[in-house]
Image (cartoon, rainbow, N blue to C red):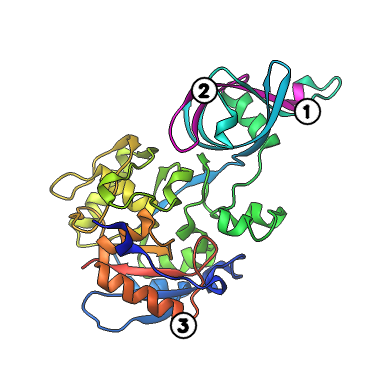
């Protein structure tokens, strides 16, 4: 499909730079296929919009401080580079986006942090070697630390990776460390938040429990490539970056049993949906899953596992806007976004939510 079909104009004032407080006070646009109009509500209305027996599927990945600033060292010369980790490939290896990538060659060493006298055990310095260069600034790095020691060094030296449409407007601060993490984040490895989950609070979970809506957790380590606009002119020419995901046998069994009883699968976020659809069999049942997924969902895709999707508002020309257009219909989704812009909904990671019912 032509990528320009998924383009739209978004005024800057509609881009959220901070989340609302409390989290579940965000607005939520309800889009149902059988209704011509849209319902304006709030995230806290979610229990009333779902039915007893429905099951929420949430992504429990935890964002790591994956933006690193380093110095490329080559013989007698040096150059500053910015590294955005996006996918772990081993105990001491990550793939990353480098900026400016043209300053890096295979075999170059990058030094992060500073030496501090007598504090080698504190991991205040970290080195990496460029072992591969791909397209679009993508590089593979082998670090001087491995496993938990590398994790600790990244946590010490890295910066929270706020999306560019926020980071370009203001500096990251201490408040973002809590705001850009779901309250149920558990499994470290994401370099971007599963943003639909940012709206949940303990009180909202309590009210969902009372309504008879259960929840299950899956893990998809969100990569930086997920939210990038598509630069190709046709969707067939776009290549998705792979991300690691896990659905346990117990979770798959619980979801299949809930659906067999008539409950709906409600994916919280496009990351949960993409993982569920990657694990779904042709008959709609969900299999255990532990692998990479690079699933790319565009209009014409036949959904097998997910009935309802809760998600934020996405970038124009992005794979995520293509996904929601596949779920609801392109014309319907364009109309929903036009309504959201006109009525002042807040867009992107810290913005408002939408609740989409599959057509």
The alpha-carbon separation of the residues under discs 3 and 1 comes to 49 Å
- For disc 3, the marked residue is 343
Above or below — where is 130 with respect to 223?
A: above
Is residue 138 within the magenta segment? yes
Residue 222, visible in the rendered structure: no
Tell me if 11 is positioned left or right of 358 in this view: right
Instruction: Tell me the magenta residue range.
Output: 121-146
Tell me if 34 is positioned left or right of 355 in this view: left
Earlier-in-chain disc, 3 versus 1: 1
- For disc 1, the marked residue is 114
Quadrant of the drawing holding the C terminus: bottom left
Q: Which labelled disc corresponds to residue 270? A: none
Question: Residue lying furthest right in this view?
Answer: 117
Quadrant of the drawing holding the N terminus: bottom left
Residue 82, visible in the rendered structure: yes
- Mark 1 lies on a secondary structure that is loop
Q: Quadrant of residue 8?
A: bottom left
State the image coordinates of residue 255 (x, y, percent, origin top left).
27, 51
Q: Quadrant of residue 183?
A: bottom right
State the image coordinates of residue 319 (x, y, percent, origin top left).
36, 53
Earlier-in-chain disc, 2 versus 3: 2
Above or below — where is 208 with respect to 293?
A: below
The alpha-carbon separation of the residues under discs 2 and 3 comes to 48 Å
Q: Which labelled disc corresponds to residue 91? A: 2
At label 3, counting other C-alpha atoms closer than 10 Å, the crowd grade (few under 14, some 14-19, many 20 or more) is few
């Amino acid at each position: 499909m032509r990528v320009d079909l998924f383009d739209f104009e978004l005024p800057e004032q509609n881009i959220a730079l901070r989340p609302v407080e409390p989290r579940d006070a965000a607005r939520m646009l309800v889009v149902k296929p059988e209704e011509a109009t849209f319902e304006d509500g709030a995230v806290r209305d979610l229990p009333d919009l779902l039915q007893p027996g429905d099951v929420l599927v949430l992504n429990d990945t935890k964002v790591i401080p994956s933006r690193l600033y380093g110095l490329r060292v080559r013989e007698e010369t040096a150059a500053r580079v910015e590294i955005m980790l996006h996918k772990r490939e081993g105990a001491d290896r990550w793939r990353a986006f480098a900026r400016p990538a043209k300053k890096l060659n295979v075999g170059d060493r990058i030094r992060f942090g500073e030496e501090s006298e007598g504090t080698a055990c504190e991991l205040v310095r970290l080195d990496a070697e460029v072992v591969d260069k791909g397209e679009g600034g993508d590089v593979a790095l082998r670090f001087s630390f491995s496993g938990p020691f590398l994790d600790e060094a990244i946590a010490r030296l890295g910066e929270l990776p706020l999306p560019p449409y926020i980071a370009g407007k203001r500096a990251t601060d201490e408040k973002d460390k809590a705001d850009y993490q779901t309250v149920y984040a558990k499994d470290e490895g994401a370099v971007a938040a599963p943003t639909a989950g940012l709206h949940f609070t303990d009180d909202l979970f309590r009210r969902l429990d009372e309504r008879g809506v259960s929840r299950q957790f899956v893990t998809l380590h969100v990569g930086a490539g997920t939210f990038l606009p598509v630069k190709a002119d046709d969707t067939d020419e776009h290549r998705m970056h792979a991300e690691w995901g896990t659905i346990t046998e117990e979770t798959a069994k619980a979801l299949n049993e809930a659906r067999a009883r008539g409950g709906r699968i409600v994916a919280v976020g496009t990351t949960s949906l993409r993982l569920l659809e990657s694990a779904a069999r042709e008959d709609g049942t969900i299999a255990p899953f532990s692998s990479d997924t690079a699933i790319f969902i565009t209009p014409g895709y036949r959904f097998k596992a997910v009935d309802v999707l809760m998600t934020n508002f996405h970038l124009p020309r992005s794979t995520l806007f293509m996904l929601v257009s596949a779920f609801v219909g392109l014309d319907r989704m364009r109309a929903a976004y036009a309504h959201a812009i006109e009525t002042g909904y807040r867009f992107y990671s810290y913005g408002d939510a939408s609740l989409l019912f599959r057509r």
